Amino acid sequence: MKKLMSLILFATLWSVGSRADQPATHGMLVFGGQTTYLSHLPMFHAPHNYQVILQAHLSGAAADSYNQLKTSVDDIFTIEPEKMDLTTVISGQKTEFSAKLFQGHFEKDGKLLGVVTVHVDKVITSAKLNPTGQPGQDYLVFGANGEYFAAHMIAGQPTYDAITKVAQAKSFPICHKRLCLDLDPVAVADSKLPITLGKSDANLLPNVNDELGLLYTTTKIQKIIYVEQNDLSM
């Protein structure tokens, strides 16, 4: 009987632990020129408590509008996806979903451009948020083919969500088991990305020309694409 009760308890705990998240609308920032990226707009409460960055491509008539506008207007673009369990996208179980595409923020008077189908090509990063974690200034640098971005890693609250455009990261070469500081730094190959670099500036929020670095690798912020504090302050 004791063994049977243990098996029942284990099955119950496994069921609770593996339960899917409640389907919800998970708004995302859309950015990138040559390559399209999506950044989930997170909060610390379930089921929105995930930081997720996706590499994707869009199809549909509204995708054509986006491709024309993204190079001609200085604005953000966001999507309002169909209600879904975001963990199925993170796990790779769900690789396509429908979404409304907006010029501007979909919850802040953004202009509806139409409906697109999002095709997820790759999960760049994903993490469940921990509100009791220690806030930090680490950024994840990613990209390819001369176009690079850095996302602030959300580690604890109060904090902020930020997506920035950055220069290609460079590193000092290593020779004879030491840094060759007398040589010019060399570009970090796309195959080495993503990498995590820290922001040493005392100001909490990112600014243009802020340097991101770690040991012998550095880059600089070129443009602030998106910053949000209110959703992550409490």
Image (cartoon, rainbow, N blue to C red):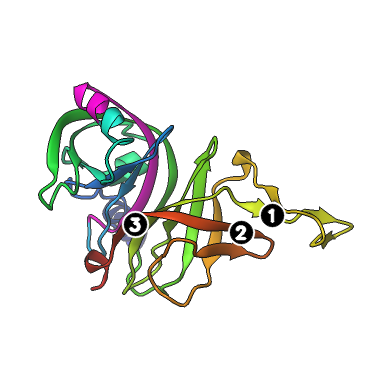
The residue shown at (51%, 52%) is: 141
Image quadrant for the C terminus? bottom left
Query: Which amino acid type corresponds to the residue marked 1 in the rendered image?
Result: Ser
Q: What amino acid is labelled 2 in the image?
A: Thr
Residue located beneath label 3 in the image: 10
Location of mark 1 (residue): 171
Q: Residues within 10 Å of mark 1 (few under 14, many from 20)?
A: many
- Residue 125: in magenta span: no
Per the image, label 1 sits on a secondary structure element best described as strand
User: Can you identify the residue that label 2 sits on?
Assistant: 218
The answer to the question of whether label 1 and label 2 lie on touching residues, with beta carbons closer than 8 A, is: yes
Which sits earlier in the primary sequence, circle 3 or circle 2?
3
Toward which corner of the image does residue 219 lie, by quadrant? bottom right
Q: Is residue 158 above or below residue 108?
A: below
Image position of 118 with respect to 139: above or below: above
* Foreground label between 3 and 1: 1
Is the N terminus in the top left, top right, bottom left or bottom right quadrant? bottom left
